[in-house]
Image (cartoon, rainbow, N blue to C red):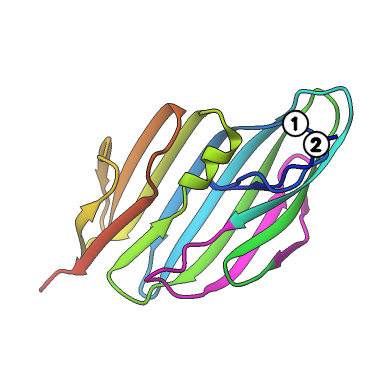
């Protein structure tokens, strides 16, 4: 059997696996910024197209260039309703996904990363290692109104203005990212 390791991100890229039957086909991401942190909440959808169970180690990359350390990471199997043991090292987290034959699964990943400048980044390009587009990708960014975006890597689809926050939305079908999600911002003068 082929060995293939996958780094999730949009996230994952091939590194080592028991099967080529595992596919990553959908993601729903919520990014937010608070005073000192960039917070990522993602739900990632997988399917096992084969007749054998899959237990696969996945790597989840963290952007470190111009960003601080990842404070915490929490990974949860939404179908089995249980926390997935994970290990965090400087540049990535690792965890196992288990899928029965011809089944699907959802994994929730939550992490908090310190903001050290006027810049935030989420790694999308590692998903190219899956060698196929993500069928559906939706993401949103929620930032306090006193932060103003100077530049952003993806054109905003829509915006919702709340009392204390602005929320920006994106939606893609057959998403094959050629760039990461990045934005630069500054604090507005009062």
Q: Is residue 164 visible?
A: no
* Picture coordinates of residue 69, whole percent (x, y): 51, 75
* Picture coordinates of residue 173, whole percent (x, y): 44, 25
Which quadrant, please, contains the C terminus?
bottom left
Judging from the image, what secondary structure is the residue with disc 1 in? loop
Residue holding disc 2: 2
Residue 84 belongs to the span the image colors magenta: yes
Give the farthest residue toward the left.
190
Q: Which mark is residue 43?
A: none
Q: Does 162 sit above or below residue 173? A: below
Which quadrant, please, contains the N terminus?
top right
Tell me which residue sits at (60%, 41%) in the image. 44
CB within 8 Å, label 1 to label 2: yes
Tell me which residue sits at (52%, 67%) in the image. 112
* Picture coordinates of residue 148, whole percent (x, y): 19, 61
Q: Is residue 11 visible?
A: yes
Depth check, front residue: 44 or 54: 54
Give the farthest residue toward the right.
52
Q: Which residues are magenta?
A: 61-87
- Estimate how packed mark 2 is, as few (under 14), some (14 to 19) or many (20 or more) residues with alpha carbons within 10 Å: few
Judging from the image, what secondary structure is the residue with disc 2 in? loop
Q: Earlier in the sequence, mark 1 or mark 2?
A: 2
Tell me which residue sits at (75%, 39%) in the image. 79
Residue holding disc 1: 20
Tell me which residue sits at (49%, 57%) in the image. 40
Q: Does 98 sit above or below residue 38? A: above
* Picture coordinates of residue 130, whole percent (x, y): 60, 35
Q: CA distance from mark 1 to mark 2?
A: 7 Å
């Amino acid at each position: 059997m082929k060995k293939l390791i996958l780094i999730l991100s949009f996230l994952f890229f091939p590194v080592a696996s028991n099967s080529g039957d595992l596919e990553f086909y959908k993601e729903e991401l919520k990014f937010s910024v608070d005073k000192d942190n960039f917070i990522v909440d993602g739900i990632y959808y997988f399917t096992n197209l084969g007749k054998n169970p899959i237990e696969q180690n996945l790597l989840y990359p963290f952007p470190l260039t111009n960003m601080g350390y990842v404070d915490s990471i929490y990974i949860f199997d939404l179908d089995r309703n249980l926390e997935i043991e994970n290990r965090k090292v400087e540049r990535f987290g690792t965890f196992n996904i288990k899928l029965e034959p011809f089944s699907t699964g959802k994994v929730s990943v939550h992490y908090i990363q310190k903001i050290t400048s006027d810049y935030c980044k989420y790694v999308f390009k590692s998903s190219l290692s899956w060698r196929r587009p993500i069928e559906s990708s939706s993401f949103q960014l929620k930032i306090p109104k006193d932060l103003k975006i100077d530049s952003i890597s993806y054109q905003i689809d829509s915006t919702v203005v709340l009392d204390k926050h602005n929320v920006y939305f994106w939606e893609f079908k057959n998403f094959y990212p050629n760039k990461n999600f990045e934005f630069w911002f500054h604090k507005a003068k009062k």
